Amino acid sequence: MSLYAVIFYLLAVIMIISTVLAITRRFLVHSVVFLIISFLATGLLFYLLGAPFLAALQVILYAGAIMVLFLFIVVTLVVEEREQKGLESFRQWIPAIVLSVISFFVAGVLLFEAPGSRETLPAGLATPAAFGQFIFKNYWFPVEIASFLLLIGLVGTLYLGRRKPKEAGNQLEDKR
Amino acid sequence: MIVPYGNVLLLAVILFLLGAVCALTRRNLLMILVGVEIMLNAAGLALVGASLKWRLLDGQAFVLFIFAVAASEVAVGLALIVYSQHRTGSVNADHYNLMKG
C-alpha cells in the first residue's frame, strides 16, 4: 500500500467518523463543529485527488463561509432544548437506516463487480491556472449563470430578512 | 498510485447516505439543511474522483458549480429558517402542520 493510499484511508475514516458524530449530536453547535472537521478532511482529499484549487475553495467556502453562517444562525436562534431530548422518535430512524444499509450494500457490490474497478488511480494534478483557463474556455456560460444564481440568492436573502414597516402590515398577520 | 476509483465512489456513497439519514431523521430544520450539505459534498467528492480517473477537468468544473449552488442554497435556506422562526417561534419541522399535511 502506497503512502497515498494510507492518506486516503486515514482521511476517509476521519470523514466518516466526524460525519456520524455530526448527525447524531443533540446540540447543534457540536454537530456544526464536527461537520467543519469533516469538510476540512474533504478538502485534503480533494488535494490528494489532484484538485488543489477546489481544495482551497472547499476550505474557504464550505469549512469557512458556509459553516460559519450555520454557526452564526445556530447561536442566534433560540432553539427549544426540551423537544430535542433523545434524538426524537425511532419511527423515522429505523426505515432510514434500513434503506441506507440496503443501498450501501447494493452500491458496494455494483462498484466492486464493475469492470476495471481494480486498477488504481494514477496521481495527477490540475494546476489552478490550467483549471481556470479550462473553466473560462469551456464553461464560461455556466459561470455567468452561477454568478446570476448567487445574485438571486443575495436578493432573496435580503428580501426575506428585511424588516417590515409596521403600518403596512402583512395581510396574513391581519387575518390572525 | 492512490486507490481504486471504486473506493472513492464507495466513500462518496457512505457520505451521501449519512447525509440522507440526517435529512430524513432529524426534525430540526437546521439539521435538515446540514444533511443536504453533506449530500452535496459527497457528490462533489465522486466528481473529483471521476475527474482524476478519466483525466478530464469537467468533473472539477462541475464541483465548482456545486459550490455556487450550495452557497446560494444555504444563504436562502438559512434566511427562510430565520424568517419562519420569527413567524412561528419554532425550528422543529413537526410544528409546521398548519395545513394538516
Image (cartoon, rainbow, N blue to C red):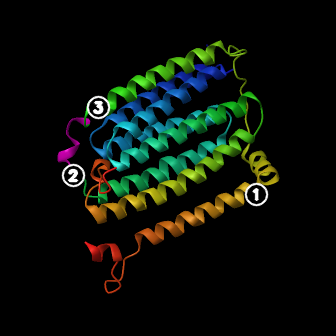
The first of marks 1 and 3 along the sequence is 3
The first of marks 2 and 3 along the sequence is 2
Relative side of B33 to B51, left or right: left
Decide: few, some or many residues near mark 3? Use Cα within 10 Å; few <14, some 14-19, many ≥20. few
**Span colored in magenta:** A80-87
Relative side of B73 to A51, left or right: left
Q: Which residue is mark 2?
A: A80
Q: Are marks 1 and 2 on the same chain?
A: yes
From this viewpoint, is residue A2 visible? no
Q: Nearer the viewer, residue A13 or B79?
A: B79
Say which element carries label 2.
loop
Q: Which residue is mark 1?
A: A141
Q: Main secondary structure of the magenta part?
A: helix
| Amino acid on which the number 2 mark rests in the picture | Glu
Of labels 1 and 3, the one closer to you: 3
Residue A86 colored in magenta in the image = yes
Q: Nearer the viewer, residue A151 or A170?
A: A170
Residue A122 colored in magenta in the image = no
Q: Which residue is mark 3?
A: A91
Q: Nearer the viewer, residue A121 or B96?
A: B96
| Amino acid on which the number 3 mark rests in the picture | Arg
* Contact, mark 1 vs mark 3 (Cβ under 8 Å): no
* Contact, mark 1 vs mark 2 (Cβ under 8 Å): no
